[in-house]
Image (cartoon, grey):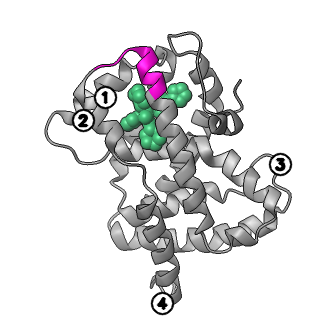
Amino acid sequence: KEKAEITKEQQAFMKVIVDSYNRHQIPQDVTKKLLQEQYSAEENFILLTEMATSQVQVLVEFTKNIPGFLSLDHEDQIALLKGSAVEAMFLRSAQVLSTKMPNGHTEVLEERIRNSGISEEFMTPMFNFYKSIGKLHMVQEEQALLTAVTILTPDRPFVKDHPAVERLQEPMLEVLRKLCALHHPREPQYFARLLGRLTELRTLNHYHTEMLTSWRMNDQKFTPLLCEIWDVQ
Ligand SMILES: O=C(NC1CCCCC1)[C@H](C1CCCCC1)n1c(-c2ccc(-c3nnn[nH]3)cc2)nc2ccccc21
């Protein structure tokens, strides 16, 4: 019995994370802009760097609200943010694409992304990920907790105190497991499938630098924050 129930303190814990997640969302204007017209590769790249920069800023604010994060070693805090920023960006992008939109809008948005300037070879893994996230029909709490679980991944490069990060990630995973059972009662494997997406996210992380340099354009400009986070320039 008690295994399934979400306890009072888990409820409070989740509320902190979900409220912070909802407060720290970049405006959906990327969707509005993309639906307006097809831009050139140069304009799309600028849009991407703008959106990604503001998303990193809100990601930092969201992360600071994760209970216990600020008590971690400061260098480990940076290592966790740096190690998860690209994954959080693709996870957020997937969530944006799987948001319910008026008829035909999602197709237009997909078309605009396919023709945005990203090279063909990365389109498949990226859209496979987007589709697999879409099929999960995650509720908001699951999205928020999955993002928090991604940030609190102990085995990121340069993290020194793994156990301290695991101690923060574990209660997060426990609440997420209960949430999945609650919201997807007829899919006992749902939680496992959700965690499987994190493995797919890591492969996108692996492609990312090549993806950036493969955009059909030259003279790519990045903001100072993205140079830090994306290891470019
Ligand atoms: O703006 C965006 N994503 C923001 C969404 C919110 C969080 C911060 C990132 C980009 C668009 C930029 C303009 C051209 C079209 C894509 N985007 C992407 C996307 C595409 C390529 C790379 C990439 N990374 N390295 N090389 N290319 C990253 C993300 N996937 C999206 C799915 C739905 C909606 C927008 C999406």
- C-beta proximity under 8 Å, tags 1 and 2: yes
Looking at the picture, which amino acid does disc 3 mark? Phe
Q: Residue 111 placed where, x, y %?
A: 29, 23
How far apart marks 1 and 2 lie (CA) works out to 6 Å
Ligand 1 rendered quadrant: top left
Query: Which corner quadrant holds the C terminus?
Result: top right
- As drawn, the label of residue 106 is 2
> Which residue is under mark 1?
110
Looking at the picture, which amino acid does disc 2 mark? Thr
Q: Residue 116 placed where, x, y %?
A: 39, 20
Label 3 secondary element: loop
Q: Residues within 10 Å of mark 1 (few under 14, many from 20)?
A: some
Q: Which residues are magenta?
A: 38-46
- Examine the image and state in which quarter residue 154 appears: bottom right
How far apart marks 1 and 4 lie (CA) works out to 41 Å
Is residue 202 at all visible to an observer of this figure? Answer: yes
Q: Work out whether 2 lies above or below 67.
A: below
Q: Residue at x 74, y 58 (%)?
A: 77
> Which residue is under mark 4?
8
Q: Earlier in the sequence, mark 3 or mark 1?
A: 1
Label 1 secondary element: helix
Residue 117 lies in the magenta stretch: no
Which residue is at the front of the view, 145 or 232? 232
Which residue is at the front of the view, 44 or 1? 44
Q: Work out whether 200 lies above or below 70.
A: above
> Which residue is under mark 3?
158
How far apart marks 4 and 3 lie (CA) works out to 35 Å
Q: Work out whether 219 lies above or below 155.
A: above
Q: Earlier in the sequence, mark 1 or mark 4?
A: 4
Q: Residues within 10 Å of mark 3 (few under 14, many from 20)?
A: some
